[in-house]
Image (tube, grey):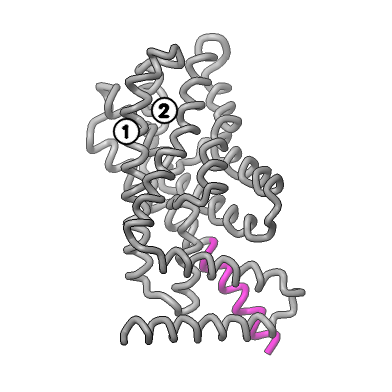
Amino acid sequence: MREIEKEENQEKHQKDLEEKSKRVSDDKGYSDILSRVINEGEKIFNLNKVTVLLSSTIAGLEIGFSYLLICALFYLLNGSIDEQIIYKLFGLAYPLGFILVILGKSALFTEQTSVLALPVLNGQRSIWEMLKVWGIVISGNLIGGILFVFFIGSTAAELNLFDQKTIADIGIHVIDQKYWVIFLSAVSAGWLMGLLTWLLNTTDEILTRIVLIFLITGTIGFVGLHHSIVGNLEAFGALLYSDSIDLMNYLSFLILALLGNGVGGAIVVGLFKYRIFETNEKQGS
């Protein structure tokens, strides 16, 4: 009975959203995007939790291909050009894993923050339900990333791609920041990822979606913003292969990055976008 009541309540909220959308004078653009994102969030909430965990673990593995390219690029160019230039070139390598994850429909935390927050803001889901799904997605992403680091750490040297010192150097570079810098940097990265989710719901064209993913995630990589899931691979690699990074360094970085990404995606993007819609709807009433 409770499940039936919950489904009926969600349908009611969805119909209310559709009614509000009709009153918004934006040529159905803004309200249509919002409706699509909320529907996408509802689909995730309705998935079996084991399915979400498996999907998020796959995402953690797939995002590792961004990390693989980053490490290979650093190893190839280190000593030939200035190290700071190499870090900027990470923007070219960063998008690969995101393209694989997003187009492959795997569950990535930073892509899900605003998607899962909007049904909560619309009254269809509770904050507790959102946090539970976030927890599952984060767990899967972290597990997948850690598995990838173990895999690539033992095989990269054999393939002459890069050595363990490269893994350590990149991880130290990512972690070696003040706490407030990591947090605010992660907020910015979460903000961009939330905007990416919004923009992707404006088009179904594959090429356009790839360009959007490349531009947004490439910017994150070029600027050096802290993305919690890619950062998990970088930081865990440093934990494994650097004497200067301990478990507390790794965990404190991870917590700050996750919190920052969550704030950037759910609050800055999710809340603001929904409030803009509500304001437009009231003006159209």
Q: Report, in whole angstroms, how far the alpha carbon at label 1 lies from the one at label 2.
A: 13 Å
Identity, as a three-letter code, of the amino acid under mark 2: His
- Residue 218: % across, % down: 60, 38
- Residue 240, image x and y in percent? 27, 26
Q: Earlier in the sequence, mark 1 or mark 2?
A: 2
* SS of the residue under disc 2: helix
Point out which mark residue 236 bears: 1
In this view, 38 is above or below 203: below
Q: Which quarter shows the N terminus?
A: bottom left
Name the dominant secondary structure of the magenta segment: helix
The reply to whether dot 1 and dot 2 touch (C-beta < 8 Å) is no
**Residue stretch rendered in magenta on the structure:** 269-285
Placement of 29 over or under 256, stated as above or below: below
Work out which residue is located at the far right of the displayed protein and give it.
Answer: 27
Residue most toward the bottom?
285
* Residue that appears at 47% across and 57% down: 112
Instruction: Judge whether residue 251 is colored magenta.
Output: no
The question of residue 272 being in magenta is answered with yes
Taking depth in this image into account, of 194 and 62 the one nearest to the observer is: 62
Query: Looking at the rendered structure, which numbered label has been put on residue 173?
Result: 2
Q: Nearer the viewer, mark 1 or mark 2?
A: 1
Residue 187 visible within the image:
no
Tag 1: Cα neighbours inside 10 Å, few (<14), some, or many (≥20)? many
At x 67% / y 48%, what residue is drawn?
206
Kindly state the secondary structure of the residue where label 1 is placed.
helix
In the picture, measured across the screen, residue 174 lies left or right of residue 21, that is: left
Image quadrant in which you'd find residue 285: bottom right
Whole-percent x, y for residue 7 in the image: 42, 81
268 over 76 or under it: above or below: below
